[in-house]
Image (cartoon, rainbow, N blue to C red):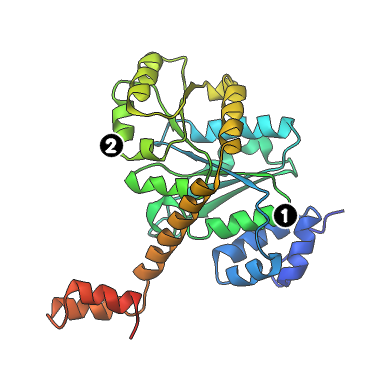
Amino acid sequence: MADDRPTNARPIGELLAAARGGSARAAGRLLTHVEGEGRASVLEAIGPPRGTISVIGITGPPGAGKSTTITALVAAYRARGTRVAVLAVDPTSPYSGGALLGDRIRMTQHIDDPDVLIRSMATRGHLGGLTSAVPAAIRLLEALGHDIVLVETVGVGQSEVEVSAIADPTVVVLNPGAGDAVQAAKAGLLEAADILVVNKADRDGAQQTVRDLRMESHAPVLTLVASRSEGIDELVDTIDRHRRDDDATRRTARVRSQVLSLAMTRLRTHPALGDVVDDVVTGRCDVYSAVEHLVIPR
């Protein structure tokens, strides 16, 4: 029987044992450590990644039906006996520091399934729409025996392409309607897309959006009515085919993007950043020298 005692004071090793035994509370506490100062301790405890977990990115503009699509995908994978985790990456409130989206509320049909873990994670100022804790959270979820992680991002700007650095494939969900494909292209979402999905395909304009997307992108374009799970089986099959085609070149590119993104986040909070900016403002050095001071401390 899973141990669900309060976990606030429990050591990492004990939390890991409890989470592997089925304690959702312990798993949640470990994810909280991963988002905070305990990240290094958790990563040390779980050891190196085994490479057994699949990461699927779900992005797209607000209102496209990303959470509904994820709910249908989770049901499809659970029907196959697959353990699934969902990381819903939310924008951070500048006032409370909390996550604003209600993803966990919208996915309540899976809330009582012990083989489904759903977690909202705040971006906390990290560029690119992904929290810097996501790679560590994925490693933890792999160590806890999950087979697939679905990463949902808010999809509001060009920096959203960062999801492609951790996921393979990245699925971009769009609404039907005139100009939607063009707006997605302007936002940089089509560059990140391995698979394009036109959700709410029973609405007017869906086929035109499909045609527009096929002119704008080489990625496969699927139609979906996620609220009724229509088209989900085809989406799952397309995801599986894409994952089987993964290779060393694509994996290297993803890791390179992750390293660069996390390095940029570290530089934004570098303790010397204020000093070098002041030096540039006052003319004591130029911007090129300032960058050298940050990247190669003296």
Q: Amino acid at mark 1?
A: Leu
Q: Report the quarter where the C terminus lies.
A: bottom left
On the question of residue 60 being in view, the answer is yes
Q: Amino acid at mark 2?
A: Lys
User: Residue at label 1?
Assistant: 144
Q: Residue at left 68%, top 41%?
A: 111
Mark 2–mark 1 distance (CA, rounded to whole Å): 39 Å
Q: Residue furthest bottom?
A: 298
Secondary element type, mark 1 = loop
Q: Which disc, if any, is residue 186?
A: 2
Against 149, residue 207 (above or below) is: above
Q: Which percent across, then down, holds residue 148? A: 65, 43
Q: Residue at left 30%, top 20%?
A: 178
| Total numbered circles | 2
Q: Which percent across, then down, holds residue 242? A: 55, 34
Q: Which quadrant of the view contains residue 183?
A: top left
**Residue 134 horizontal side relative to residue 108, left or right:** left
Q: Which residue is at the front of the view, 102 or 170?
A: 170
On the question of residue 100 being in view, the answer is no
Against 221, residue 63 (above or below) is: below
Against 185, residue 222 (above or below) is: above
Crowding near pointer 1: few (<14 within 10 Å), some, many (20+)? some
Q: Which disc, if any, is residue 171?
A: none
Q: Which percent across, then down, holds residue 255? A: 49, 55
Q: Residue furthest left?
A: 283
Crowding near pointer 2: few (<14 within 10 Å), some, many (20+)? few
Q: Residue at left 40%, top 14%?
A: 207
Q: Which percent across, then down, holds residue 98? A: 48, 56
Secondary element type, mark 2 = helix
Q: Residue furthest front?
A: 248
